[in-house]
Image (cartoon, rainbow, N blue to C red):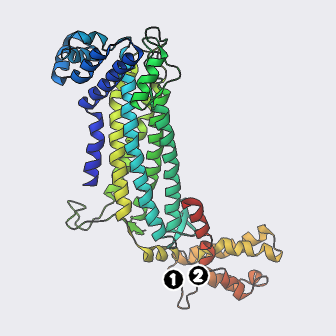
């Protein structure tokens, strides 16, 4: 239900009606500004503001003849006015209206995306504190490394999403500009004060300089910020997909009563939501190329950017909004299996403690090279033992790695049995979790 509401709220900002509503806002803001500057009398200003409206079907009808959407729009609006219509669009060019209006649409859409990201952050934060001390194995290259906690994984996700939030806020500032600078951006037919008054009325800033259009590096920054956000969201989704693999099974997407995973295999519970998020993020990243291609327009402008933006702007925002709501709900409802995390942590027979042993030997005067040889040869035996079917942990709760180390004469010449056993302590790896959390969440 949340996803459906969010999609409608965002998609409503990119309907044909929403586009013309934004155009009309700009045109009326210009009328009010001209009135304040003395060009338009109070009576004409009042009539325009009270009676200006458009009819979408009529615009379509007119555009079939004019082949120009802004002229068709202005004609439709003017049909509802009297002689005062002569002041509509006065001193303006089409892009004054369009680009300022699109700036409004993007700004409002970014506000929704920013709200979505804050909701995602909060969902991650709640789960991070829930699993702050939930032990699991850290992996590099997909191979077991050392003990970490699931809370630390979530804290990293939170911190990364927070950086995207900063980018989005910056992008919102960059795009929240308007222009009423005329056909070549030289203010030949309207003073700078007109642009300033229009932008103030609309809650935008005047572009410091523009030609016939708002410069498209601004749009590229917005789409790039969304793409970077999408990359981080996909990172989360891919991790969840890995955790749900049968061989891993440390986390799982919530599987609701009555849900089906496969038409052929009744047992299947697939990570369909995170796979869906992955696919949507790929689409979102794809919009960066056309957005950047749009930056290089001919001279003061051409129209090559227009068709691109009619696709990528609504699609990017609607897709990002849907994706973020889906991922947030996924995180909220994620089923976590701490017992399986611990099972996997012990899977390699204590090898996750190898660096701890390695770092103890130099304290005893052993060179790093010799220390590495001692630890590695015992570690390699564990891999062989596991392949030969030996249990990772014996009945005395001694791991294979610990058993091997306690038999190694070179090691025992430098470390006592008790010192070796003390190296197999999970709390050693979690002692700084609280401090890391303070860094991230404070």
In terms of image quadrants, where is residue 260? Answer: bottom left
- Circle 1: is it few (<14), some (14-19), or many (20+) Cα within 10 Å? some
* Element type at mark 1: loop
Q: On screen, 206 above or below 5? A: above
7, 393: nearer the viewer: 7
Q: Is residue 4 visible?
A: yes
Q: Residue furthest front?
A: 42
Q: Residue furthest bottom?
A: 396
Going 53% across and 80% down the picture, which residue do you hit? Answer: 392
Q: How many numbered marks, from 0 up?
A: 2
Q: Are marks 2 and 1 in contact (CB under 8 Å)?
A: yes
Say which label, 2 or 1, has the lower sequence index: 1
* Element type at mark 2: helix
47, 395: nearer the viewer: 47
Which label was assigned to residue 400? 2
Going 44% across and 65% down the picture, which residue do you hit? Answer: 126
Q: On screen, 292 above or below 83? A: below
- Circle 2: is it few (<14), some (14-19), or many (20+) Cα within 10 Å? many
Q: Residue furthest right?
A: 365
Location of the N terminus by quadrant is bottom left
Location of the C terminus by quadrant is bottom right
Q: Which residue is mark 1?
A: 391
Going 47% across and 12% down the picture, which residue do you hit? Answer: 187
């Amino acid at each position: 239900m949340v996803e459906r509401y969010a999609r409608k709220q965002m998609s409503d900002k990119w309907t044909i009606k929403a586009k013309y509503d934004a155009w009309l806002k700009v045109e009326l803001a210009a009328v009010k500004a001209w009135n304040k500057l003395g060009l338009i009398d109070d009576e004409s200003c009042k009539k325009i503001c009270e009676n200006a409206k458009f009819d979408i079907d009529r615009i379509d009808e007119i555009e079939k003849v004019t082949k120009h959407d802004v002229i068709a729009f202005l004609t439709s609006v003017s049909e509802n006015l009297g002689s005062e219509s002569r002041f509509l669009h006065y001193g303006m060019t089409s892009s004054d209206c369009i680009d300022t209006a699109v700036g409004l649409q993007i700004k409002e859409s970014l506000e929704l995306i920013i709200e979505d990201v804050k909701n995602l952050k909060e969902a991650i934060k709640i789960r991070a504190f829930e699993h702050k001390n939930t032990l699991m194995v850290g992996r590099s290259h997909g191979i077991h490394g050392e003990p970490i906690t699931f809370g630390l994984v979530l804290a990293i996700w939170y911190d990364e999403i927070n950086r995207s939030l900063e980018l989005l806020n910056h992008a919102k500032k960059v795009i929240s500009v308007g222009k009423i600078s005329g056909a070549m951006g030289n203010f030949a037919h309207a003073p700078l004060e007109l642009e300033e008054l229009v932008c103030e009325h609309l809650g935008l800033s005047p572009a410091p300089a523009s030609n016939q259009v708002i410069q498209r590096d601004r749009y590229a920054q917005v789409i790039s910020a969304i793409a970077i956000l999408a990359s981080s969201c996909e990172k989360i989704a891919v991790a969840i997909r890995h955790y749900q693999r049968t061989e891993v099974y440390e986390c799982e997407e919530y599987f609701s009563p009555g849900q089906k995973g496969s038409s052929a295999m009744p047992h299947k519970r697939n990570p369909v939501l995170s796979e869906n998020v992955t696919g949507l993020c790929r689409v979102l990243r794809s919009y960066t190329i056309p957005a950047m291609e749009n930056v290089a327009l001919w001279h003061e402008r051409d129209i090559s950017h227009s068709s691109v933006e009619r696709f990528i702007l609504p699609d990017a925002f609607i897709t990002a909004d849907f994706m973020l709501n889906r991922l947030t709900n996924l995180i909220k409802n994620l089923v976590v299996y701490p017992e399986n995390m611990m099972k996997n942590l012990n899977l390699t027979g204590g090898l996750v403690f190898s660096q701890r042993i390695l770092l103890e030997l130099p304290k005893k005067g052993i060179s790093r090279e010799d220390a590495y040889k001692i630890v590695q040869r015992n570690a390699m035996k564990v891999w062989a033992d596991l392949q030969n079917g030996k249990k990772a942990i014996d009945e005395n709760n001694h791991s294979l790695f610990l058993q091997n180390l306690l038999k190694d004469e070179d090691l025992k010449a430098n470390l006592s049995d008790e010192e070796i056993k003390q190296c197999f302590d999970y709390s050693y790896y979690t002692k700084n979790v609280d401090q890391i959390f303070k860094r991230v969440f404070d």
